[in-house]
């Protein structure tokens, strides 16, 4: 009987140790349509939906992972054939729509370097924003960048409660996600 109790106790301690070793953020690389590679902190769910921006319908493939109250997401949409100025207009409209979706205000604008990865091409300096808004009565922050490359529009965002993203650990997770982007 005592031996069985020791086995149960040992099993219980093993479970505790394994749970303690289980990372909250389990980063893994995911290859997305259009050749973009990004690190996500958890299993990625995907769906395709049609969005309308400036009267143009785009089929956007969304890829997202959620850890606690943080959402890490990337959308990829093929752009209609046209000139680069039309693509830039759509890019700006998507960025503005992201901020409007949660009644947000842009707090900061900067650029994020998207690495060329193994493709050997040039890096992209993607326009990025930090915005604050409201979602379900809660103040949230959104780190987002929207850029165009080779007729593909990429929408990258990390959204979560301000207190989590403004904390040192939150800033580190945002940096890990955004700096992981690599062009294929």
Image (cartoon, helix red, strand yellow):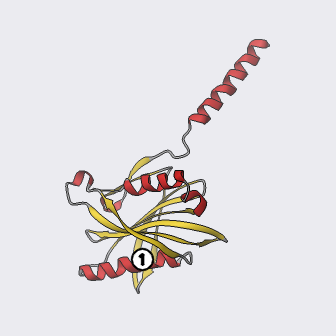
Viewer-proximal residue among 42 and 137: 137
Q: Is residue 36 left or right of residue 101?
A: left
Residue at image location 31% in from the left, 59% down from the top: 114
Front one among 74 and 70:
70
Q: Residue furthest bottom?
A: 55
Q: Residue at x 49, y 50 (%)?
A: 41
Judging by the rendered image, the residue that carries numbered circle 1 is 94
Q: Residue at x 63, y 26 (%)?
A: 14
Q: Residues within 10 Å of mark 1 (few under 14, many from 20)?
A: many
Q: Position of residue 155 (x, y in %)?
A: 41, 68
Q: Quadrant of the N terminus?
A: top right
User: Can you say which quadrant of the picture contains the C terminus?
Assistant: bottom left
Question: Residue at position x 49%, y 55% from top?
Answer: 171
The answer to whether residue 154 is visible is: no
* 176 sits to left or right of 151: right
Rendering coords of residue 104 (x, y %): 54, 76
Relative horizontal placement of residue 67, taking residue 32 as reference (left or right): right
- Say if 29 sits above or below 108 in the image: above
């Amino acid at each position: 009987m005592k031996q069985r109790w020791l086995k149960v106790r040992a099993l219980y301690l093993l479970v505790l140790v394994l749970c303690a070793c289980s990372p909250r953020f389990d980063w893994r690389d995911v290859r997305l349509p259009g050749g973009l590679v990004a690190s996500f902190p958890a299993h990625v769910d995907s769906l395709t939906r049609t969005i309308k921006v400036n009267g143009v319908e785009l089929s956007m493939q969304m890829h997202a992972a959620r850890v606690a109250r943080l959402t890490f997401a990337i959308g990829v949409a093929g752009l209609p054939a046209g000139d680069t100025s039309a693509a830039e207009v759509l890019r700006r409209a998507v960025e503005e729509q992201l901020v409007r979706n949660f009644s947000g205000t842009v707090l900061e604008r900067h650029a994020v370097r998207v690495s060329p990865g193994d493709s050997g091409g040039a890096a992209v300096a993607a326009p990025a924003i930090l915005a604050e808004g409201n979602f379900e009565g809660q103040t949230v922050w959104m780190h987002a960048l929207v850029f165009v490359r080779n007729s593909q529009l990429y929408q990258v965002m990390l959204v979560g409660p301000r207190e989590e993203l403004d904390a040192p650990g939150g800033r580190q997770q945002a940096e890990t996600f955004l700096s992981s982007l690599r062009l294929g």
